[in-house]
Image: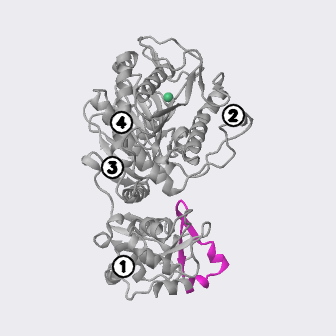
Amino acid sequence: VAALGLLLALGSVSAAETNASVPVDEGIRARIVDGRTIVLEVLPEPGEGYLAMARRLCGDPDLAHALEAANASRGLFVGRPALVPWDLLRSEYRYLSLLALFPEDEFARGAWHHRPGQSPVPVVGEGLWQVAEWYTGRGENWVHIARANGIAGPDLPPGRSVHVPAELLLPLFRPPVLGPERLLRYDRDEQGPFAEYRLRRGEALYSAVVLRFTGVLAPDDEGMREMVEIIAERSGIGDVRRIPTGHAVKIPLELLSLPFLPHNHPRKVLAQVRQSEMRALSLPRRPSTFDGVHVILDSGHGGIDVGARLNGVWESDYTYDVACRIRRLLEREPGATVHMVMRDLDHGYRVFESRQLPLNRREVVNTDPPHANKNRRDVKVGVNLRWYFANDRFEQLVGNRKASPEKVIFVSLHADSLHQSLRGAMVYVPGSGYRAGNHAVGGSAYRRYREYSRAPVSFTRSQRLRDEALSTKLAERILDGFRDQDLHVHLNMPVRDHIVKRVHRHRRPSRYVPAVLRANAVPAKVLVELVNLNNREDAHVMADPAGRERMAKAIVAGLRDYLAAP
Ligand SMILES: [Zn+2]
């Protein structure tokens, strides 16, 4: 009945009100109907039915029938928003809708301050019942809110601000206090919310704060310097080399990486929704041997682009040598096929048993015709040709039924250039939140390659979630392989679903997935940073042919375990 009333109400909204909705998440907008009823408008994904939608928006597939009833007269069509009534919404989306609809609301002085008069959409029929329902989860709580605000009845004059005492609030509206392991304390001042960290003896802003809490890694990166500057300025630190022990360092929340964000930060809440969706996914059964498995193997540099060059070793030739070793190991596995993204025009796939590799600028991308990196423009084209190559092979294998999608795996090999104190392997996976939109690139530089395709390259939300779930499993198995080979693994978040870079003062840092994963159609795909070349011991392992062989074995073992896992 409630759903029917809602539809009638929607039928009566005027054209002006139709625009009165605010974005909540990708493809999701919140609207207030009749001045006081919150409803979500959600664009269905291709192939998404009520069951999948109930799981995504309601957190409960059992609500599929109720959702269907609410959309009975509209049906479910791609490109046309479906309605999810408030009663059916999962708590995370209720919370995010309220934040979006009432952007001036905030927690202060022991209560949640609700300011409907400052909403971008018209709020006219709201009473204390709605306020109690939205922020405490129980409409009956309106009497307590009335008492706290000195209001006699349940009615509210339009636009009247009220506060909801902390003890009544749902957990997501309560202010966070302490971060994980009590390392951080959350607070706010006139400049907004922040996380506070107290420096211990001998700790530096760069390593103890930026490296640990922001997810930025590269020491010489401009973004890193900007982060240090922003945090120093926010904390009243004049000289970053002379910070007294115990000084309170204030980190703006938008700089924090996911594990350190407070429980109710929108980025954390959205990530938790995605996590719960990934847990609910029924992942395809994977083959348990290499038989019929296709590995698309990339080494991330080549030609004039040698990549990072530190401590006597460099990325292009050394990662290519590891790729050739992986190829050699996999070719001993019955039924395995390796598709090399790069090829050395001089030496083919020859493995070198020396510490000093010849500096080679003759690796090409294995496209038709082959693509050589002869200048900076070529390098950029080469980066995109890698995923065009992968997508072309994937399409040929899966489209022609030579392999099922779960039998194709993509691995790209790189080596980091991080702070010299950091060691070990790290794996990037395609974070589902960073792959929306169309990734196609084009132009005359691409058209001459057979692998290039004009078709738009984009992925549905469920494809992206599946990719992230599969790739994360693959990444974890590969890192287990490194540990089993006594190779180092990065201590701080060795599996990452995005890169953080460049801050541009007073703006958010950019967070992205590298193109070779972002636009890649292969479901299970990882980018492995084999070592940190700026660390002397790591570079030493990379120079050693036996070290490179252990890396190759680690990756093959990781692939094997991934394929065998249920
Ligand atoms: Zn690289």
Residue placed most toward the observer, 59 or 561: 561
Q: Give the SS element for disc 1.
A: helix
Cα gap from disc 2 to disc 3, whole angstroms: 39 Å
User: Quick check: is 135 in the magenta stretch?
Assistant: no
Q: Amino acid at mark 1?
A: Asn
Q: In the rendered structure, which disc, 1 or 4, sits on the residue that comes first in sequence?
A: 1
State the image quarter where residue 445 is shown: top right
Contact (Cβ within 8 Å) of mark 2 with mark 3: no
Q: In the rendered structure, which disc, 1 or 2, sits on the residue that comes first in sequence?
A: 1
User: Quick check: is 22 in the magenta stretch?
Assistant: yes
Q: In the rendered structure, which disc, 2 or 3, sits on the residue that comes first in sequence?
A: 2
Instruction: Identify whether 79 is placed above or below 308.
Output: below
Residue placed most toward the observer, 109 or 322: 322
Cα gap from disc 3 to disc 4, whole angstroms: 14 Å
Cα gap from disc 1 to disc 2, whole angstroms: 69 Å
Q: Where is residue 392 drawn, in percent x and y?
A: 60, 40
Q: Pointer 1: what residue?
A: 149
Discs 1/4, front: 4
Q: Is residue 553 left or right of residue 514?
A: left
Q: Where is residue 179 drawn, in percent x and y?
A: 29, 50
Residue 566's disc is: 3
Q: Pointer 2: what residue?
A: 449
Q: In the rendered structure, which disc, 2 or 4, sits on the residue that comes first in sequence?
A: 2
Contact (Cβ within 8 Å) of mark 3 with mark 4: no
Q: Amino acid at mark 3?
A: Pro
Q: Residues in magenta?
A: 8-33
Residue 558's disc is: 4
Residue placed most toward the observer, 502 or 300: 300
Q: In the rendered structure, which disc, 3 or 4, sits on the residue that comes first in sequence?
A: 4
State the image quarter where residue 120 is shown: bottom right
Q: In the rendered structure, which disc, 1 or 3, sits on the residue that comes first in sequence?
A: 1
Q: Give the SS element for disc 3.
A: loop
